Image (spheres, rainbow, N blue to C red):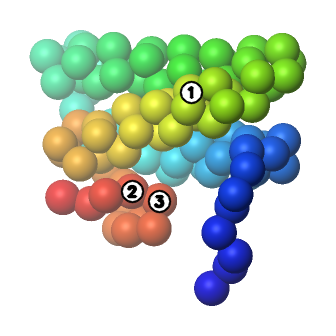
Amino acid sequence: MSEPHVEVTSELIQRYLGLTQAARDKATPLFPSESDEGKRLAIMMEMADSYASDAKWFVEQGDLVRAFGAINYAHAWIDCAVKIGLMDGHGDDEMFTLP
C-alpha cells in the first residue's frame, strides 16, 4: 500500500487529471443523445468537462488546492453518470462506483 498524501502537489494533480480523462474516455453513453437521458447526460458531461477545465486553470494560477477540488468534482460527475445508469463503466470498479 502506498503512503498517504499529506499535501497537494503538482504531481498529484497531474495524476488525477489523467485519471479523470481516462474515466471520461472509458465511460460510454447508454442512451442516444437525442433522448431525455442523453440530454441529461450531456449536461452532466458538460459539468465534468467544465470542472476539469477549471482544475487546469487553477494549476496555471498555482492554486493546487482548488485544482484538486475541481478535478475531483469532475471525476464525480462522470462517476455519477455511471452509477445512475446513464453511462457504461465497462466493469471497471476501480475507476467507477458501479451500480
In the picture as drawn, the residue positioned furthest to the left comes out as 36
Question: Label 2 is placed on what type of residue?
Answer: Phe
In front of the other: 25 or 13: 13
User: What number is the disc on residue 70?
Assistant: 1
**Left/right of residue 53 with respect to residue 48 in the rendered view:** right
> x, y (%) of residue 28?
40, 43
For the question of whether residue 41 can be seen, the reply is yes
Cα distance between the residues tagged 2 and 1: 17 Å
Q: Quadrant of residue 78?
A: top left
Q: Are marks 3 and 2 in contact (CB under 8 Å)?
A: yes
> x, y (%) of residue 40?
23, 18
Sequence order check, earlier mark of 2 and 1: 1
SS category of the residue bearing label 1 = helix
Circle 3 is placed at which residue position? 95
Image point (45%, 68%), residue name? 94
Total residue callouts: 3
Image point (63%, 36%), residue name? 68
Question: Label 1 is placed on what type of residue?
Answer: Ala
User: What number is the disc on residue 79?
Assistant: none
Cα distance between the residues tagged 1 and 3: 17 Å
Q: Residues within 10 Å of mark 1 (few under 14, many from 20)?
A: many
Q: Are marks 1 and 3 in contact (CB under 8 Å)?
A: no
Circle 2 is placed at which residue position? 96
Cα distance between the residues tagged 3 and 2: 4 Å
SS category of the residue bearing label 3 = loop
Q: Quadrant of residue 89?
A: bottom left
